[in-house]
Image (cartoon, rainbow, N blue to C red):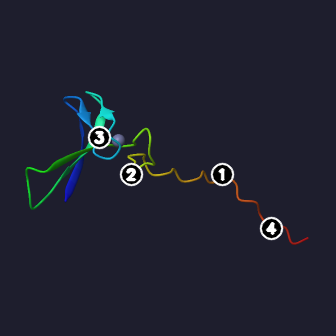
Amino acid sequence: MSDHITIAKHDHPCDLCGGIIPKGSKCRIIHDDFMPKLVYFEHLRCPTAKAVFTDSPKPKKPLKPKFMPAYCGC
Ligand SMILES: [Zn+2]
């Protein structure tokens, strides 16, 4: 199985939830490597189910303080 994310050119039914993937929205396409004619369309995030794939970027690293508090041994 191989998959990639593309923009839907037509309205497609989602193979996971059965909802409509509207034209112009991002969706996930899955190709079967052994049967190339088998293609599955999925929402990136089905509106009625848990997320199966997210394309959110990695979380940002926290900002480091400009001054590190120095230890005072008084
Ligand atoms: Zn769906």
Indicate which disc residue 71 carries: 4
Image-based side of 20 in relation to 48, left or right: left
Image-based side of 38 in relation to 48, left or right: left
**Which of the two discs, 2 and 1, sits closer to the camera?**
2
Indicate which disc residue 43 carries: none
Quadrant of the rendered image containing residue 68: bottom right
**Which of the two discs, 3 and 1, sits closer to the camera?**
3
Q: How far apart in space, not on screen, are marks 3 and 1 (Cα)? A: 49 Å
Mark 1 within 8 Å of ligand 1, using the beta carbon? no
Q: Earlier in the sequence, mark 4 or mark 2?
A: 2
Residue named by callout 2: 52
Mark 3 within 8 Å of ligand 1, using the beta carbon? yes
Residue named by callout 3: 14
Indicate which disc residue 66 carries: 1
Quarter in which the N terminus is drawn: bottom left
Residue at figure coordinates x 30%, y 36% from the top left: 26
Q: How far apart in space, not on screen, are marks 3 and 4 (Cα)? A: 59 Å
Q: Nearer the viewer, residue 25 or 57?
A: 25
Residue at figure coordinates x 45%, y 52% from the top left: 58
